[in-house]
Amino acid sequence: MSWWDDGVDDDEPELDESSIRMRPNPKANRPRTKTRPEHLDALTARVLAVDRGRYTVLLDEGTPEERVLTSTRARELRKQAIVTGDRVDVVGDTSGAEGTLSRIVRIVPRTTLLRRSGDDTDAMERVVVANADQMLIVVAAANPEPRARLVDRYLVAAYDAGITPILCITKTDLQDPDEFLANFAGLGLRVFRSREDDVPLAEITEALVGHDTVFVGHSGVGKSTLVNALVPTAERATGHVNVVTGRGRHTSSSTVSLRIEAPGGSGWVIDTPGVRSFGLGHVDTANILKSFTDLAEIALECPRGCTHLPDAPDCAIIEAVAEGRLGENGPARLDSLQRLLGTFATIKADQYS
């Protein structure tokens, strides 16, 4: 090599950053980033209804500026269920003018979540409604015949969610409901009795004011009829009971929040479609006992793994009731707890059989 030869082939081109070959972006857009805006200007709204990817939400609730918006959800929420009763943060066009569309960017942390599964062996839960604090179980005294086990399931789901259940029994002019109601004597449920010519609208309305109450019930029990009577503008579809099968026809096909107005204030009725089954594959048994606060305290003295069922050895609750420490209502309370726990135990046994 000569002293003037630097070892570099002068015929080779020089390389720099611009020499890197990159595959062209066919969409001519910037690459996506996982960094999302904080949306500090978002406004909080109540979800009133959900319909095929569109969400009806109420903004500035209870103020002169109150308005209803139609919203979509942000891409980052595509894997999260947004349900009736949710409180959500919205951005975009929040004027509520016809043809406008806002966007849901956040779900506010929920206080309660009512869930059910497709069946008892299905671990996949389905969210029914969010943020309800009451459940009104509507059941008919006859036509269709009342099903105590279905009511048990509603009660288990309510207790699991931390929701207070109340009961309305309709069509009491067709059948005396006392025998059926005896199944729930130990629960301390508030019960409303309704007949065709005497619907206790004032009493039910009073119980709903100040609450978000989810209505549930078997198809054909008169749930939608009751909703229409409480909220005249609801216009929920009503049906009839098939005289051959004794089953009600599904009429309400969606879950929707409706405001109920009364002299003492207002509340929210959340009407749900009628169901013939209510899967409990997601329920935590401990939440059932928690709802019986007096019995739960005594249960702390039970042996580990105690089922509290009639054949449970050394169950402190059974012993306390037998000794009369829970008063006259003790046996009924224990019977109600054991009914619910027994229902759930049967479900689990079938699931793993």
Image (cartoon, rainbow, N blue to C red):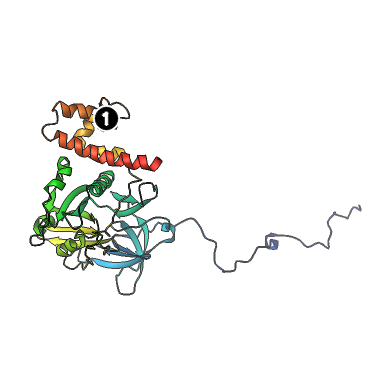
Q: Residue furthest front?
A: 244
Mark 1: amino acid: Asp
Please indicate, yes or no, whether residue 209 appears anywhere in the rendered image.
no
Residue 129 vertical placement versus 313 (above, below): below
Q: Residue furthest left?
A: 198
The number of callouts visible is: 1
Give me the residue at 16% from left, 47% from top.
Answer: 180
Q: Residue furthest bottom?
A: 98
Q: Which residue is mark 1?
A: 311
Residue 73 falls left or right of residue 136: right
Residue 159, percent from left and from top: 25, 44
Of the pair 249 and 319, the residue shown nearer to us: 249
Residue 175 vertical placement versus 238 (above, below): above
Residue 244, percent from left and from top: 24, 62
Give me the residue at 27% from left, 29% from top.
Answer: 312
Of the pair 43 and 233, the residue shown nearer to us: 233
Label 1 crowd bin: few (<14), some (14–19), many (20+), radius 10 Å: few
Residue 183, percent from left and from top: 17, 43
State the SS at label 1.
loop
Of the pair 270 and 100, the residue shown nearer to us: 270
Please indicate, yes or no, whether residue 53 appears anywhere in the rendered image.
yes
Quarter location, residue 8: bottom right
Residue 150 falls left or right of residue 325: right
Residue 100, percent from left and from top: 34, 72
Quarter location, residue 162: top left
